[in-house]
Image (tube, grey):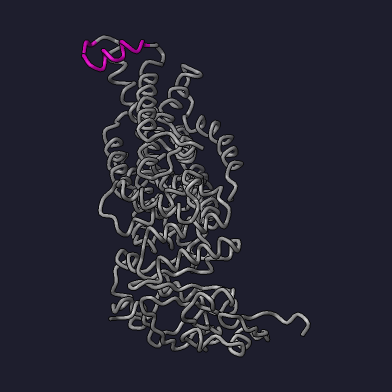
Amino acid sequence: MRRARPEKLALLALLLSLASLLISLSTGSTDIPFVEVLSCLVNDDGSTHDRIIDQLRLPRTVSAFAVGGMLALAGALMQVLLRNPLGDPYVLGVSGGASSAVLAGMLLGIPAFWLSPVAFIGALASTLMVFSLARSRTDPGSTRLLLTGIIMAAGWSAIISLTLSLSPAMQLPGMLFWLMGDLSDALNPAPLLAVLAAGLAASLWLAPQLNVALYGLEQASLLGVNPMRLRMQLFFLASLLTAAAVAVAGAIGFVGLITPHLVRLLGATDQRQLLPLAALCGGSLLTLADTAARTMIAPMQLPVGVLTAVIGVPVFLLLLQREKNL
Amino acid sequence: MSALIEAHALTLARGERCLVRDLDFRMDAGECWAVLGPNGSGKTTLLKALAGLVPVPPGHLELGGQALERIGVRERARSIGLVLQQGHPGLHNTALELVMSGHHPHRRHWWDTPEEYQDAHRALREVGLDTLAQQDTQTLSGGELRRAEIARLLVQSPAIALLDEPFNHLDIGQQVSMIRLLRRHFVRRDKGLLLVSHDLNLATQVASHCLLLHGDGRWSAGPTSEVAAGAAFGELFQFPLVEYRGAKGPYWGIDWEG
C-alpha cells in the first residue's frame, strides 16, 4: 500500500480537529452558524449566543477534545508497551482502576479537587499490578499481558459495583452518570489541556525509543534503549493521561483503542508521527461523539461513554479480524 | 590488540541445570565463529549473555577489553549486535522503518537524516528487499522478515555480529548470499562474526573457529580444523555421523542404512 506523505496527514488531522471543534460549538439547543461562532470567539458582544459559546459550549468542547486526545495518546502508548494493537486503557483495566479509586473517594467524601490525584494512584496501581502479575522470566508475551489486563478490568468492575451498592441512594445517579463517561460537568478545560500538552511533549521525546521498542523490549535493549526505564516511563505517562481523563469524564472506552488504529490505517506507523496524529484525531472523535451525545435525544443527554462503546465494539471486532497475528 | 570477546570461567545455567561450565574463549577480529550443539544446550543463552540480555555475574565477560557490565546500553549496542532467533515484526511498520531502527544507537538527533535513509536503502538492496521497502512487516514471509533483520544489523554495524540460527527460514540460495554478505561485512580487520547453526556442513565451511556446547557443562572451542571432527560431532549429538572427504575438507552426513 502506498503511504500518504507525513505533511498531508498532519494537515488532514488539523483540518479534522478544526472542523470537529466548529461543529461542536455551533450545534446544540440553538444552532449557531459557523461564521457567528467565529465572531463570538473573537469579540465579546455580550449577546445570548456569545454567552452560550463562551460559558457553555467552549469549555465543554475543549474538555472533550482534551479528554479524547489524552485517551488516544494513552492507548497508542499502551499499544507499543504491549506490542499489540488491542492495547487500550479501558481494555487493560487502567480506567477501571482509576474509576474505582474515584468512586471510593466520592463515597468517602473526598473533595472534588483531590479526585484527580486519587484517580492517578488508582490508574498507576492498576497498571503496575497488571504488569507485575503478567511478568514472566522472559519478555512477557503480549497475550499474557492482555489477558491479565482484561481480568483486572473485570475485577475493577466488581469493585465498582460493590462501591455503588454501598453508596447512599442520593449520590447514585451522579456516580452512575460519571461512571458511564460523561462530559457535562467538564467545564474547566485549562488543566486538561495542560496535561495533554505535557503528555504529548513527553511522548514525542520518547518517540525515537518507542520506534525501537515496537520490535520487542529485547530488541530495544539490543539497539541501545534501557528497556526497564522506558517501560516505567510508559507506565507513568499512560497512567497519568488515563487518570486525568477519567477523573473529569469517567470511563470512556474505545477512543484509545480505535484512534491509533485509524491513524495506522492512514499510513502513519512511525511513533513520531503517530502519537501527535492520534492525539488530534482522538480529540476530534470524542468532540464529535460528545456533540452527538448531547444533541441526539435533546433536551436529554446521553453519556458519551455509551455512544463510544456502541460505535467502538463493532469497530474493535472489525479490527480484530484484520489482525492476522493474534 | 584486545580481543573482541573474551570469556573467563563463564558459567551459564537454566534453572537448576548447568548448561556451560567455566567457559574460556577468545574471539579476535577477523574471525568467524560457529556455535554448535544439540537443542537446549545453551547456544541462545550464550548469545544473549554476550549481548547483555541475560545477566552474567561480573568479571566473566569482556567486549573489546572492557568488562561487559560496565558498558552502557547504548555503547554496547554500538559494539555488539544480535539477530534474535524469533524477531517481532512491529505494529504494521514498514520494512524500511524496521531497518531504520538500526540507526538508533548511533543517533544524536530526533529526526532522520538523508544519509540514514541512504544507508537503510542500501542495506535493503543488499539483502534483496529493495522492492519491499514500503511493505508492512506483518505481511512479510519468515525468510523476508529475517533478511530485513539482517539489513537492520548492517545498518547498526556493530563490531561484533551475533546471529541466532539466521538461516533457518532461508532457502539455499538465500543462505549462500546471506553468508557471503555477512562475511563481507563482519569478517574483517576490525570486526567479527559469531553464529549459531544446526547445519554442520555449512557452519564448518564458513567458520574459522567452532565452539561446541554439549548442554551438560562440557564444551570445546578452537579452530575449525582442530575442533570439527566426526568423532566430536558424534559425541556432541549422541548420534553417529559419516565423514566424507571433500576437496575443501571433510563434510558429514547421515548413514540411513546403519
Is residue B52 among the parts visible in the rendering?
no
Most foreground residue, A125 or B193: B193
Residue A94: give x, y in percent of width and height.
Answer: 44, 48
As drawn, A292 above or below A35: below
State whether residue A192 is above or below residue B220. Answer: above
Seen at 29% across and 31% down, the residue is A188
In-image side of A314 versus A55 (left or right):
right
The overriding secondary structure of the stretch rendered in magenta is helix
Q: Is residue B232 visible?
A: yes
Magenta highlight on residue A43: yes
Based on the displayed image, in which of its 4 quarters is residue A46 positioned? top left
B250 horizontally vs A74: left or right: right
Q: What residue is drawn where x is 38% and y is 63%?
A: A221
Say if A1 sits above or below B127 in the image. Answer: above
Residue B171, image x and y in percent? 60, 61
Give coordinates of residue A85: x percent, y percent: 50, 46
Residue B205 is one of the magenta-drawn residues: no
The range drawn in magenta is A32-46
The residue at 46%/16% (across/down) is A299
Which of the 4 quarters of the picture holds residue B247? bottom right
Q: For the view shown, which residue lies furthest in the left direction?
A: A44
B171 left or right of B222 in image: right
Q: Residue furthest right?
A: B257
